[in-house]
Structures are given as C-alpha cells and as structure tokens.
Image (cartoon, rainbow, N blue to C red):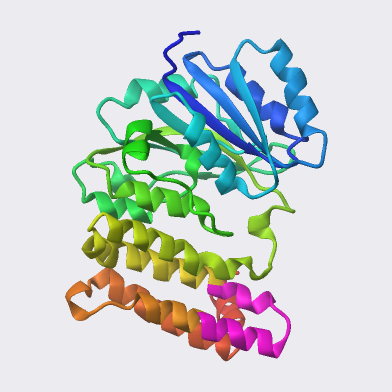
Amino acid sequence: MSENVKISVIIPNYNGSKYIINCIKSLESQTYKDFEVIIIDDGSTDNSVKIIEEYIKISKMKISLINQFNQNAAVARNRGIEIAKGEFFYFIDSDDELYDENVLLTIISNIDESDLLIGNYVLINEDGTIMSKYENNKDFVDENKELYKYAELSPVPSNKFYRADIVRKNNLFFGNVKIGQDLNFYLKYLQFCKKIKIIDNMFYKYRILSNSMTRKINLNFLDIYNTFVDIKKCYEKNKNLDNFNLYIVPVAIRHYHQQLIKVDKIKGKEKRKMIFFYFKFCYKDVQVNKRYRTRENNIQTKKFWIKYFLLKLKLYKKIMKIKGEM
C-alpha cells in the first residue's frame, strides 16, 4: 500500500459484532488499495472490539482502532476526521457493506475536479437480502444545475465522497445531535461545493435493522430542530444566510413533516399536545420574509400546515389508508 493515503474510510462502531467483519471484508476485497481504515469504537459493550482486534492481526489493510466512551456516531466520525490522513473521506457504518469489490476504484476514477461525488445504494435486511434500491434522481445528473438543489437528495453519508481539504479548511464536523447527523454534515458541506458529480453506480449496501435508533420511536426525533439550528449557525458564520433561507429552509420544513408524523405513535394526550406545540414552534422559527418566498418554499409550507392539522384532528391515518399510502 502507498504511504500517501488517498482515501480515509471512517467507521463508527457500537456493538456491531454481528456485522462488523462483513463491513471490513468488503473493504479488504477492494481492487483499489490506496486507503486507510479508521474504526472508532463508541464504548461497545459486546465483543466487537475483540473481533476487530483479531481481524487487524491478519489483515493486509492499514486499520486503526480508536476507543472512546459511549457518546454517539457523530462524535465517533468527528474523531475519525481529526486523525485521518487521506485526501478524501468516505464514511460507512459498521453494519453496512460496500456494494462490490470495485466501489473505491469507481469512485477514485470519477472524482476528477468534483468537490462531492454521489452514487446510489441498496437497502438490505438483516440477513443481507436486497429490499430495494435508492437511485438518485436523474434530473440531478446535469453538473451545471443549481448546486443547492442537491440538498433534496438523500443525506446518507455512505453514498458520498468528500474532499478532506474542504472539510478541514472550513472546520466542518458532524453536529452532536440525536437525529439528522448525516443531514447536518451534508448540508453544511454543500455550501462549499463548486462542482458536484453524480454517477449511476451502486456504492454500498445499507442494512435496515429492526432495533436501530432511526426505527425506534422516542423523543429523540424532536432534536431535528437542533440539527437545523446548527446548520444555520454554520451558514451564518460563512455569511451565507440568504442561501440557507432560500434552499435549506424548505428542506428543514420537509424534515419537520417527516418527524411530525411520529406523533401518531406517542401515547399520552399531554405529551402529544407538547409535541404539536413544539413542531409549530419549529416551523415558525424557520419562517422567512417574502423576499425568500419561492414556489418550493410555499409548497412545503402548505404541506406542513395540512399535515399538522390532519394529525391534530387524528385524520391523517384515515386519509392515508384511503389513498393507499400506508
């Protein structure tokens, strides 16, 4: 392997003993070899650290294992960013896998002058069976398209290839929030891109776990507000608030929609009332004056209020069943 590391693959791990070896092996099999692997263990209580240590002994790859007290995946990824030596960052979770042995070669062959490279991915279940495919909207293939329109794409990190110099120069990190960490980093990075390239290749297999944090219903979803507060601070710091209001606010409202739906699964009248009030506040906080009123913004605003009142009147589920969308 070359001493000049081209790619830093950063993997946060928490109790990933069941799948971490599959993840590492998908890296070991890559035809492109100029990369380092940084695994940040986030205070695992299973035997995954031992499994990783044993694999490191037999691996030909350059693997660093860093241990930290349990915090969250964002803190783990940020630790990886701090110690990474590569020119590019690639983030993948310990329960996911690269799609095939040519993923990194495909990425490095296509990066050219792009600040961000984006590919496709598949969703797999716990036994590795493909459930569905996520393919980027073909409308975004035009590299000359308004760059902020890419804010509408899936924010997952493992179908994206980031330039380390942009991350470091602009002091970018994953926000320490309970939900939307990937979205947080992606939207902050987006403002520094001059050229984005989408390629029609599968990058990785995204495993859907029944016990994952994103599938559990708890009050962590309320932290979506703090996700966008942190993004706004970054745009404000870089004197980019106009673009935040024009392009990121509609994204914020759309994500408030997605989280608001979870109120249906929350028990307790007072708790539900508090959540409705909270999301009403979230929306009001991102309202902007008329100079930023675009068609997209207006559409998202109308959708928010329709969904808000339907949920409050307990009619949302009934209407979705009639439409066949649930």
Residue 184 visible in rendering: yes
Residue 154 visible in rendering: no
Q: Residue at horizontal 74%, vertical 22%?
A: 53
Q: Main secondary structure of the magenta part?
A: helix
Of residue 133 and residue 95, the one placed in the foreground of this image is 95
| Left or right of 24 in this view: 133 | left
Rendered location of residue 307, percent (x, y): 48, 81
| Left or right of 295 in this view: 260 | right
Magenta extent: 260-278
Task: Examine the structure image and report whether residue 264 is included in the region drawn in magenta.
Answer: yes
Q: Residue at horizontal 46%, vertical 38%?
A: 159
Q: Quadrant of residue 178?
A: bottom right
Q: Residue at horizontal 49%, vertical 83%?
A: 308
User: How many marks overall?
Assistant: 0
Q: Is residue 252 above or below residue 128?
A: below
Q: Is residue 172 above or below residue 298?
A: above
Of residue 290 and residue 298, the one placed in the foreground of this image is 290
Rendered location of residue 50, percent (x, y): 79, 27
